[in-house]
Image (tube, helix red, strand yellow):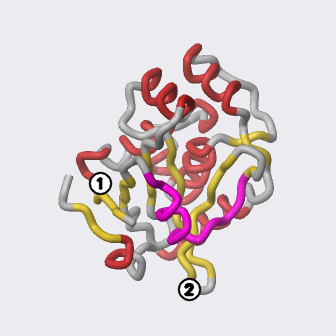
Amino acid sequence: MTKAWHYDAIRKVVRTGDLFGTLSPGMISHGIQRVTHGDVSHVCGAVVVQGRRCVLETTLGTGVHLVPLSRWVEGRKGGPIYWWPARFTEEEQDRYASALFDRLGARYESPTAMLLRVALRRKVKPNDRWFCSEIEATARVQARPSQFMPLWPEPSQVWPCHVADAYGGVGKALQVTA
């Protein structure tokens, strides 16, 4: 991994489709990391809305919603933040953003159900609750099917580490500080 970059240094170059990942403190986060053997327990993608950099976030209680990237970065105290520029074309960015916006307002998968899915490696039936990596896999498959469809034919079975690994894992990421 390269040196850590301060958020102020990258914010103007973040583009729609860029991937952010983190390993946050907490039981659910560590459970996901332990069961998936991954370096990240949460992922979210950037979308630029009227010049403002945001991420589509999935949280308990709030569900799927947009958060300014600056606020998201500031709120990630206690864990590393990784950034993978996606380098999508404008057309791919549009398809990616469209897929994200289709999920706005959706419910979040419960932490207990999510951890059980990971721990038991169970396939789940599609439902109206979304986990961060499901949204990312769905949007990335829609943006660039030739690259991501072979990796993730069933987005509901994709975990945060799988999304990060598609970009080379944390070893290929840029680290971001608040």
Residue, x 79% and y 35% (percent of image)?
A: 127
Identify the amino acid type marked 1: Ala
Q: How many marks?
A: 2
Task: State how far apart marks 1 and 2 are (Cα).
Answer: 24 Å
94 vs 66, nearest the viewer: 66
| Up-down relation of residue 63 to residue 48 (above or below) | above
**Where in the figure is residue 89, as x and y percent of width and height?**
45, 72
| Up-down relation of residue 82 to residue 156 (above or below) | below
Residue 126 magenta: no
| Up-down relation of residue 30 to residue 52 (above or below) | above
Write the start and end of the magenta stretch as one range: 64-77
Identify the amino acid type marked 2: Gly
Q: Which mark is residue 104?
A: none
133 vs 153, nearest the viewer: 133
Q: Which residue is the extreme one toward the top? A: 120
**Where in the figure is residue 160, as x and y percent of width and height?**
49, 40
Residue, x 68% and y 25% (percent of image)?
A: 112
Q: Which mark is residue 173?
A: 1
50 vs 69, nearest the viewer: 69
Residue, x 54% and y 59% (percent of image)?
A: 143
Tag 1–tag 2 contact (CB < 8 Å): no
Q: Is residue 22 left or right of residue 57?
A: left
- Could you tell me if residue 11 is visible in this image? yes
- How packed mark 1 is, by other alpha carbons closer than 10 Å (few <14, some 14-19, many 20 or more), is many
- Could you tell me if residue 92 is visible in this image? no
Q: Which residue is the extreme one toward the bottom? A: 51
SS of the residue at dot 2? Answer: loop
Query: Which residue is label 2 attached to?
Result: 51
Location of the C terminus (image quadrant): bottom left
Residue, x 38% and y 67% (percent of image)?
A: 87
**Where in the figure is residue 64, as x and y percent of width and height?**
72, 54
